[in-house]
Image (tube, grey):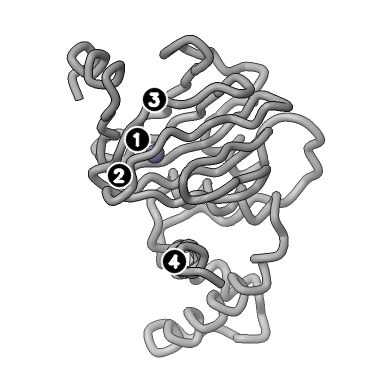
C-alpha cells in the first residue's frame, strides 16, 4: 500500500469514527450514512466503533448493551442526531439518508448552471460555515482547478470522477484538504453526480477560477 492510499484510508477511518461517535454536523452525517447505504463493507467497522462508543457512554448513562436499539438511541441522542432512517431499496435517485437531508429527490432538484458542464444545487445550513452541495458534472468534463481552506468531503452518487488522488466510483468518498489543488474530472461513460460538503469556502486557483471568484465573492 502506498503513502497516498494509507493516507486516504486514515482520513476515511477518522470520518467514520466521528460518525459513530455522533460528532459530525448534519451534512457530513448524512453523507456518511448515504455512503454506508451504498457501500455496506464499512458497516461492520462502524458498528464496532458504535459499540466502543456505547461502552464509553455507560459511565454517564447506563444502557442495556444487549439492546442494540438502546445503544443506537443513546449514541444518536448524545450526538443530537436523528436516528438512522430505515434502509429501503431505491433503484433510482438519492440514497435514503441524503433524501432526508436534502428534502427532495434528484428528479426534483432545481440545478443552477455554474459553468458549461457543471451544475450545482446548494443546501445551506443556518448559522454554520458548512457548505453542502449536490454537483452534476457532465461526462468527461473537469471541475475548475481549486484548493480548500478546510476539508472537502465528496460522495459519488452516480458515475465516477478522478483527480490526482485517485479514481472514485459510486459510493466512494474523497477527502481533500488545503494541501490538495485539484481538477476532478468526470468519467467518460456517464455524467457524475456528487454530494460535497466543505467546512470553509473552496478557493478557485486556475485562471478561469480567479476570474469567476471576483464575481462569486469568495
Ligand atoms: Zn476539491
Mark 3, Cα crowd under 10 Å, few <14 / some 14-19 / many 20+, is: many
In the picture of the structure, the residue carrying the numbered disc 2 is 199
Rendered residue at 38%/45% (across/down): 152
Residue 7's label in the rendered image is 4
* Mark closest to the chain's N terminus, 4 or 1: 4
Rendered residue at 59%/70% (across/down): 46
Does residue 82 lie above or below 143 as drawn? Answer: below
Image position, residue 20 (x, y; %): 50, 68
Mark 4, Cα crowd under 10 Å, few <14 / some 14-19 / many 20+, is: few
Which dot, 4 or 1, sits closer to the camera?
A: 4
Q: What's the CA distance linking mark 4 and mark 2? A: 20 Å
- Under circle 4, the secondary element is helix
Q: What's the CA distance linking mark 2 and mark 1? A: 6 Å
Asked if the residue at label 3 sits under 8 Å from ligand 1, the reply is no
Image position, residue 113 (x, y; %): 46, 10
| Mark 2 in CB contact with mark 1 (< 8 angstroms) | yes
In the picture of the structure, the residue carrying the numbered disc 1 is 131
Q: Quadrant of the C terminus?
A: top left
Does residue 96 lie above or below 6 as drawn? Answer: above
Amino acid at each position: 500500500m502506498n503513502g497516498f492510499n494509507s493516507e486516504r484510508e486514515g482520513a476515511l477511518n477518522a470520518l467514520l469514527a466521528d460518525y459513530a461517535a455522533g460528532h459530525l454536523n448534519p451534512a457530513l452525517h448524512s453523507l456518511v450514512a448515504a455512503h454506508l447505504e451504498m457501500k455496506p463493507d464499512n458497516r461492520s467497522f462502524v458498528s464496532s466503533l458504535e459499540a466502543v462508543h456505547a461502552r464509553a457512554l455507560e459511565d454517564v448513562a447506563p444502557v442495556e448493551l444487549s439492546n442494540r436499539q438502546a445503544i443506537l438511541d443513546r449514541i444518536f441522542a448524545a450526538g443530537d442526531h436523528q436516528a438512522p432512517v430505515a434502509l429501503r431499496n431505491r433503484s433510482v435517485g438519492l440514497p435514503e439518508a441524503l433524501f432526508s437531508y436534502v428534502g427532495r429527490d434528484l428528479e426534483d432538484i432545481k440545478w443552477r448552471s455554474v459553468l458549461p458542464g457543471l451544475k450545482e444545487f446548494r443546501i445551506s445550513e443556518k448559522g454554520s460555515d458548512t457548505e453542502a452541495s449536490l454537483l452534476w458534472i457532465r461526462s468527461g468534463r473537469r471541475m475548475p482547478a481549486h484548493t480548500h481552506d478546510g476539508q472537502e468531503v465528496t460522495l459519488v452518487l452516480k458515475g465516477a470522477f478522478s483527480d490526482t488522488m485517485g479514481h472514485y466510483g459510486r459510493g466512494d468518498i474523497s477527502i481533500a484538504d488545503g494541501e490538495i489543488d485539484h481538477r476532478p474530472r468526470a468519467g467518460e461513460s456517464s455524467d457524475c453526480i456528487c454530494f460535497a460538503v466543505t467546512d470553509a469556502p473552496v478557493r478557485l486557483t486556475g485562471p478561469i477560477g480567479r476570474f469567476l471568484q471576483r464575481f462569486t465573492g469568495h
